[in-house]
Amino acid sequence: MAKKAVIIGIDGVPCSLLKAYMDQRIMPGLREIVAEGNLMPMRSTLPEVSSVAWTSFMTGEPPAEHSIFGFMEIDKNSYQYVFPNFTSIKSPLFWEGLNVPTIAFNIPQTYPARPMNGVMVSGFVAPDLTKAAYPQRVYDYLKAMDYRLDVNSRLAAEDPDAFFKDLFQTFEKRTEAIRHLFTSEDWRIFIAVITETDRLHHFFFDSAFEGRYHEVFADFYNRLDSLLRELFLRSKKDGAVFFTCSDHGFTNITTEVYVNRLLMEKGLLDLPSGATNLTGIGAGSTAFCLDPSRVYMHLKGKYSRGSVSPEDYEKTRNQVKDVFESLAYNGRKVVKKVFLKEEIFSGPYSQDAPDLYVMGEPGFDLKSSVGKNSVFGLSAFRGAHTYEDAHFLASGCTIPEDNISIENVAGLVLRSISED
């Protein structure tokens, strides 16, 4: 390695939002950084969900190579939900082969933390701080300073003001820990992810550009801007290359779309009344959905109650595909594209990929929720992920690409730190 690298992940922050906030002087520090670098839109992964995208960031690989397809899977015999964690990732992390001190702070899908050359503090989903920090001295520090693993998202619907207070307090603890690790630890690669942005966007993205809570966005992003400028200036003084990126974009929600309910209404999924999961799936079921909109054919030989035979697979899958392609809401097309497995997944874990991946048109948030009484509805969420409009920013290096995805970031970082 010829250079140090600083990478600040900002979960769920669209490129378009950053450009708007620079124009509105909400983020003057970012304007300084961009003046010496390059800010561009970036594509997420498919599925465009944090666990998948941040794993692709860490490995430089697509889902069928690293084996993470979502936050949730099901056991093929019991149909119980199972939750992949850090130990489920099958590809090496991009910094592991360098054998240099690395800080990996608050990256989603890194729980439980594991020993490494440097420091690891796990990100979402991390329920227990004792298993979320390595080495012990870092745990001791985080415990003593009352570090917060995440925002209390339940407050968003119950008491927005309490949620905002908790959001800012969590961010303050996050930034305090980032500053401490940045200045007190030995490192050559420093990675830290801010996840408060994602929580704010999920519940209040309809105020991101204007609206009732726009001042909260302006205040939060101004504080974030100060942190970015501080880290950028320190990086520049150190001769380090500086990056920021997000794992996906965000958009307003017109309506949520409950995919398993749709499959039930079309006679493709049999679940008992009042079901809250898939354990009661009927043997005659053709397909089911796991978040965000991964549709699996209920295959014989793959699932204990599977009903779709291999010879009927293509015909049945096309029938299910037609259901989504014809779906409309108040005269509007709901689905932008239905991808066949083989169109977007290639690698040793392709057998675990969904048979169909359904991408909604902007504003339609497709969910696997079980127990819904209608196909369309709204919840406390006001923002949904997008595949397009994630962001990538680089300063202190040359980035030749102008059409990149989060899977490219690892390679760009490695190339940049070896530049003469």
Image (cartoon, rainbow, N blue to C red):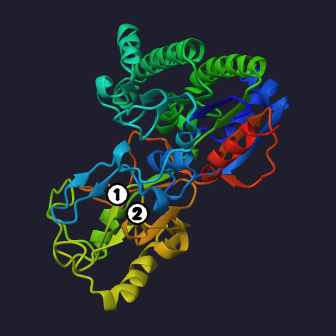
Query: Is 31 positioned to the left or the right of 347 in the image?
Result: right
Mark 2 touches mark 1? (CB < 8 Å): yes
Q: Nearer the viewer, residue 230 or 185?
A: 185
- Mark identifier at residue 294: 2
Query: Is 63 positioned to the left or the right of 411 in the image?
Result: left
Residue 22, percent across and down?
A: 76, 29
Q: Identify the residue at horizontal 52%, vertical 63% (top origin).
A: 359
Query: Is 235 positioned to the left or the right of 93 in the image?
Result: right
Q: Nearer the viewer, residue 38 or 269?
A: 38
Look at the numbered disc 1 and give the secondary structure of its residue: loop
Q: Can you say whether 26 is above or below 89 in the image?
A: above
Whichever of callouts 2 and 1 sits on the residue coming sooner in the sequence is 2
Residue 379, picture quadrant: top left
The amino acid at mark 2 is Arg
Residue 172, percent across and down?
A: 51, 14
Label 1: few (<14), some or many (≥20) within 10 Å?
Answer: many
Q: Which residue is mark 1?
A: 368
Q: Which residue reaches farthest bottom?
A: 311
User: Total label count?
Assistant: 2
Q: Nearer the viewer, residue 196 or 56?
A: 56
Q: Identify the residue at horizontal 55%, vertical 43% (top origin).
A: 97
Q: Is residue 388 visible?
A: yes
Residue 45, percent across and down?
A: 55, 55
- Mark identifier at residue 193: none
Residue 197, percent across and down?
A: 54, 31
Label 2: few (<14), some or many (≥20) within 10 Å?
Answer: many
Compute the Cα span from label 2 to label 1. Answer: 8 Å
